[in-house]
Image (cartoon, rainbow, N blue to C red):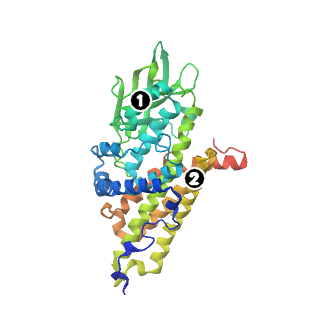
Amino acid sequence: MSNAAFDATTLPYADGDFYAFEQMLTAKEQDRLAEVRDFLAREVKPIAVDCWNRGEFPMDLIPKLGELDLVSPVRRQGYSNLFAGMLHAEVTRADASIATFMGVHDGLFTGSIEALASQEQKDAWLPDIYSLKKIGAFGLTEPLGGSDVAGGTRTTARRDGDHWILNGAKRWIGNATFSDWVVIYAKDVADNQVKAFLVDTTLPGYSASKIENKISLRTVQNADITLDNVVVPDFFKLANGNSFRDTNKVLKVTRLAVAWQAVGLQMAAFDVARSYAVERQQFGRPLAAFQLVQNQLVQILGNTVASTGMMVRLAQLEDAGVAKDEQSALAKAFTTARMRESVALGRSILGGNGIVTDYGMAKIFSDAEAIYSYEGTHEINTLVTGRAVTGVSAIV
């Protein structure tokens, strides 16, 4: 039988789960993951490239995602961190932009409410947040503050009786062009501590403008936010968000989610590269018949397996309640570095077709660049890990 005569989708490793990591999930979790995977195949993958090309978010997808009930799988629904990670990887595998939308709304925004709000505030806000009837954004990064925002927050909050007055600017805020709410982190002028506020995006003085001309995650609607004497009632100051140390409780968890995104994007690269290598004919036979192509495919697979294995162990530590910040930092640094290599290899396998979005790989290749940088750059996460193993800080 010739190489071109068989159906490669029937091979035992067609799903890319080379070490059968999904078998570590419970039967209920495996069924749930399969349900989400079917939804993504029907509703997300067919429109992903077109939305990316146009730089537009598919707003009609939000109610469908709400019905799928994906928000807060661990904190609200009782699933394991391993399931939540694999779920996030699977969404990224279908479309990194939709995964980022969910990561912002669920991990950063909802995570802020769950970690920092009072019970009264949670009762008032979370039902609509969980159902996606209210969409959220997370306002931390600023035009002049990224990696140094912990000590360099320039947005200010001033107490005025039963209200707070916010002034400043935020940048790269995902979902912010259409979100109903945004959690804004601002420095209290009275004590110089960073505090968290739930801001209604219809308030006077609040404005958001879309950041144009991106080469990565084009479907995500990132915005520049301006806060010009925005008056926020005291009830909307998150009760337990009173310092950057409190903020870091949220970032530790979301850093894990981005590392899982790096896994998912490598899975996507493997899917596209493998299918192309099997189907594409060169010199009278499929690309997969060439040793150098197989070497590249196996390198992508090895990177994906290594990244997944690290994340599986970290999810276990998270489930046990003993995961540390530096372990999350290493995971984010390592998996995104492997991701960058994997998508480059995938693009190479597709040759010229790898630089047009028609074949999917160009989108995957470009999306990797944003994932490599956000939730702590590779360099910052490396230095956080280095500080943990040497006892000496090299962050200046």
**Disc 1: which residue:** 125
Q: Quadrant of residue 70?
A: top left
Mark 1: which secondary structure?
Answer: helix
Counting from the top left corner in percent of width and height, residue 278 is at 37, 75
Q: Nearer the viewer, residue 76 or 187?
A: 76
Q: Residues within 10 Å of mark 1 (few under 14, many from 20)?
A: some
In-image side of 201 versus 78 (left or right): left
* Residue 31 in view (yes/no): yes
Q: Earlier in the sequence, mark 2 or mark 1?
A: 1
Quadrant occupied by the C terminus: top right
Q: Nearer the viewer, residue 252 or 128?
A: 128
Vertical arrangement, residue 221 with respect to residue 314, above or below: above
Q: Amino acid at mark 1?
A: Trp
- Front disc: 2 or 1: 1
**Disc 2: which residue:** 331
Q: Looking at the image, which residue is at 42% across and 74% down?
A: 11
In-image side of 167 versus 330 (left or right): left
Counting from the top left corner in percent of width and height, residue 10 is at 38, 73
Q: CA distance from mark 2 to mark 1?
A: 32 Å
Counting from the top left corner in percent of width and height, residue 282 is at 35, 80
Vertical arrangement, residue 254 with respect to residue 192, above or below: below
Q: Looking at the image, which residue is at 50% across and 55% down?
A: 26
Mark 2: which secondary structure?
Answer: helix
Q: Amino acid at mark 2?
A: Ala
Quadrant occupied by the N terminus: bottom left
Counting from the top left corner in percent of width and height, residue 7 is at 35, 76
